[in-house]
Image: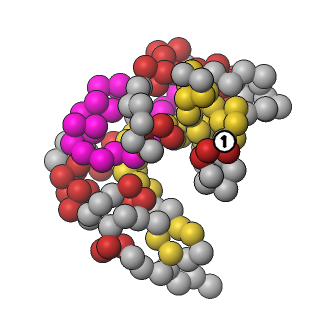
Amino acid sequence: MRIIPVIDVMAIKNKKLVVHGKKGERDKYEPIRGVLTTSTDPVEVAAVFQKLGTKELYVADLDAIMGRNFNLDYLSKIIKETDLQVMVDVGIKNKEQVELVKKSKVHKIIIALETLQSLSQIDDYMTLLTPEQTILSIDLFEGKILSKSPQLNLRVHHP
C-alpha cells in the first residue's frame, strides 16, 4: 500500500498557498493550519512531507483547475528543492496546457474527468504523454461521475 499526501494550492491575496478544502466550496477555502508545519508555502509543505519519508506528492492547483492563473513556478521549486515524485492536477483543458505542464518536469500529469469536455480529449492528450506519465482521475459525488462531458453522465453502482 502507498500513502500519497495531497496538497491543494490556491492563490490568496496573490500568493500561492496550501489550503484546506471545505466540501468543494472553493470560495471558503483558507490557508492550512497544520500540525506538521506552520507554513502554508507549497515548497515548504512539500519539504516537510519529504522529511517524513514520503516519496510522492499529489498537487492540485485549484487556480489552474478553475481556469484562473496557470502559474506553475512553485512546482518547479518543489521539484528542484526536494526529491519527491510530483504528480499534478491542473485541470488540463487543452494540448497547450499539457505541453506547459510537461516542461515543469513533473513525474505524472493527472487528467481529471471532472474537467474534460469530451472523452476524445483523452486521446488528444495521449498523443503527447505516455501511459507512465499519466494518471486518470475519476471523481464521484453521490454515485455519479463528476464531469462536464455528457458521455460521462453515468451513475456508478457499488455495494
Question: In the depicted view, which residue is nearer to us: 102 or 144?
Answer: 144
Q: How many marks?
A: 1
Question: In the depicted view, which residue is nearer to us: 103 or 18?
Answer: 18
**Residue at 39% across, 60% down:** 113
Residue 7 at x, y percent in the picture:
60, 37
Q: In this orientation, does residue 42 appear?
A: no
5, above or below 117, in the image: above
- Direction from residue 14 to residue 34 in the image, left or right: right
**Residue at 35% across, 25% down:** 104
- Direction from residue 11 to residue 29 in the image, left or right: right
Instruction: Tell me the quarter of the picture where residue 109 sits.
Output: top left
Q: Amino acid at mark 1?
A: Tyr
What residue is disc 1 on?
Answer: 29
Instruction: Tell me the quarter of the picture where residue 133 sits.
Output: top left
Badge 1, how many Cα within 10 Å: few under 14, some, many 20+?
some
**Residue at 55% across, 29% down:** 11
156, above or below 89, in the image: below
Report the coloring of the rendering.
secondary structure
The quadrant of the rendering that contains the C terminus is bottom right
- Direction from residue 116 to residue 124 in the image, left or right: left
Q: In this orientation, does residue 94 appear?
A: yes
Question: In the depicted view, which residue is nearer to us: 120 or 87?
Answer: 120
115, above or below 36, in the image: below
Residue 29 at x, y percent in the picture:
66, 41
Give the magenta range: 83-105
Q: Is residue 98 magenta?
A: yes
Residue 136 at x, y percent in the picture:
39, 56
**Secondary structure state at the residue bearing disc 1:** loop
Q: Is residue 4 magenta?
A: no
**Residue at 28% across, 37% down:** 97
As drawn, which residue projects farthest toward the right? Answer: 35
